[in-house]
Amino acid sequence: MNPPLREKLYTLPNFLTLLRVFFVPILIGIGLEISGPADTWANRALSFCGGLIILLSAISDVLDGYLARKWKIVSRLGVLFDPLADKLVILTALVMLVPLSRVPAWAAVLFVAREMAVTSLRGFAAAEGMFIEATRMGKYKVTLQSFAAGLIFLYYPYFSVNWYEVGRVFLWLALAVTLISGFDYFYRFFQEESARRKKNGG
């Protein structure tokens, strides 16, 4: 027997998902408190905390999905908020890194624009009775974005490694995969729309 809806909502996977949403205002606060590129203990501590939050967010994303599948407690709340929580954390991090001159504004705009465009497309497709399935490229996108945002937030060298430069490499890889996966969604949408019109004789 399926548990009631209220019981399904109060699960560990859903808690982990909502925890990522809670990370968003913390990232905003950290970003606002970092005072430029100066290598001070305060800037290092804040940058380290920002990178750590993004790492914890990525771990919780993997963990909540694993637990939901293992315990067979996938809920509508989780399906809706899990990808939304990922987007909120990553996009917040990238936007907060712009005024710190760690991420170019145009790159952040492209990341945000892609997410808005794909979300709008999927909503329109759903209204038309079409389902555009997510692909592995979307998972690669989230992974690369998480590495990029986390390492660029970390910023300062540790163990003789320039984490900012490593993060920038992941940033450009993430941007490329983000745009390619975005175009892929539109391509598959128009393919499915065209096939449906032919089937209906339109």
Image (cartoon, helix red, strand yellow):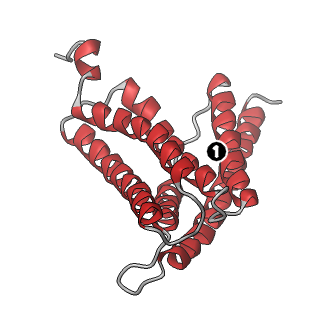
| 148 sits to left or right of 8 | right
Relative image position of residue 152 (x, y in whole percent): 52, 66
Q: Quadrant of the N terminus?
A: top left
Furthest-right residue in view?
202
At 29% from the left edge and 32% from the top edge, which residue is drawn? 15
Observer-nearest of 94 and 113? 94
At 20% from the left edge and 16% from the top edge, which residue is drawn? 3
User: Of helix, strand and loop, which one carries label 1?
Assistant: helix
Q: Is residue 84 above or below residue 177?
A: above
Relative image position of residue 56 (x, y in whole percent): 33, 52
Observer-nearest of 173 and 70? 173
Query: Which quadrant of the figure has residue 190?
Result: top right
Relative image position of residue 139 (x, y in whole percent): 47, 55
Relative image position of residue 123 (x, y in whole percent): 64, 29
Say which amino acid is labelled 1.
Glu
Q: Quadrant of the C terminus?
A: top right
| 200 sits to left or right of 41 | right
| 22 sits to left or right of 36 | left
Crowding near the residue tagged with mark 1, few <14, some 14–19, many ≥20 C-alpha atoms within 10 Å: some
Q: Is residue 80 above or below residue 167?
A: above
Residue hosting label 1:
115
Observer-nearest of 112 and 37? 37
At 24% from the left edge and 22% from the top edge, which residue is drawn? 10
